[in-house]
Amino acid sequence: MPRNLVVYGLAALAGLVVYWVLRTVLGPGIVTVLALVGLVVGIVIVTRNLRTNRQVAEATFQQRDEALTFAPVPGKAVLYVFRNQFVGRAVGINVVIDGREAAQLKSPRFTRILLTPGAHRIAGYTGTNKAPAPGEGTELVANPGDIYVAKCEVEPQMVGATIKFTPMSVDAARADLQKITRMVVPDVAEI
C-alpha cells in the first residue's frame, strides 16, 4: 500500500506538470476541453467497472461469528477467501473455483466455502475482464478436515487488473478476518 501511494503521488505530480506545459503551449481553452474529455472518459471507466457488480447475499452476524470459529468440517475442507485491500475496493471480484463462480467479493469482505477433498483451482476476475481460462489460477490440494485461507488482491496493470490469491495460515489471517465485519454467502455452498 505505501508503495502504491508513492506511485499515485508521482503520477499526480506528473499530471500537473503535463497540464501546466500543455496549458502554456496550447492555451487555456484547448486544455480545458481536453481536461473535460479526460474527466468524462474517467467517469465512463469507473461507471462501467461498478456496473459489473451484482447483488450478493450478506451473511447474518450469527453466520459470520460461526464462520470465525474456524471449526473444521468432517470429511470436507474449508476455504476462506477474503479481501481487505483499499485498491479497487468498490469493484466486485468474481471468485471462481474449478471453473464455477463461487462468490463475488468487494473489499472488505470474506466468504467461507466447503471443498471436497482433492485438487482445486482458485481464480478470479472483475466483470470487465474475461473469465480465467481452465488452467489459470492458484492450485490448492484440499485434505479432509483442513482449513485454508486465501487473500484476494487486485494488482492494477496498464490495462485492466490481475487478481492474485495468496495462501495464508489460519493464525496469520485470523486478525485480518476478525476486523472484517461483512461476510458474503457463497453462490455454491460446496465445490
Image (cartoon, rainbow, N blue to C red):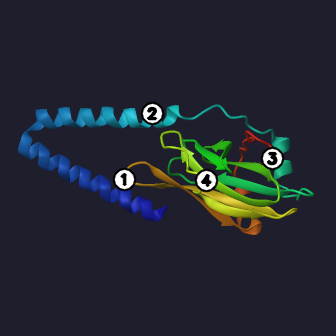
Q: Is residue 182 left or right of residue 106?
A: right
Q: Can the viewer see residue 60 in this picture?
A: yes
Residue position for label 2:
48
Task: Give x and y (percent) for residue 136.
Answer: 57, 56
Mark 3 touches mark 2? (CB < 8 Å): no
Q: CA distance from mark 3 to mark 2?
A: 31 Å
Closer to the camera, 191 or 145?
191
Secondary structure at badge 1 equals loop
Q: Nearer the viewer, mark 3 or mark 2?
A: 3
Counting other residues with Cα less than 10 Å from the Cα at mark 2, is it few (<14), some (14-19), or many (20 or more)?
Answer: few
Q: Earlier in the sequence, mark 3 or mark 4?
A: 4
Residue position for label 1:
158
Q: Earlier in the sequence, mark 1 or mark 2?
A: 2
Question: Which numbered dot is residue 32?
Answer: none
Q: Can the viewer see residue 175 in this picture?
A: no
Residue position for label 3:
190
Mark 4 touches mark 1? (CB < 8 Å): no
Residue position for label 4:
123
What amino acid type should be assigned to the residue bearing mark 2?
A: Arg
What amino acid type should be assigned to the residue bearing mark 4?
A: Ala
Q: Nearer the viewer, mark 1 or mark 3?
A: 3
Asked if residue 158 is positioned above or below residue 103 in the image, the reply reads below
Q: Nearer the viewer, mark 4 or mark 1?
A: 4
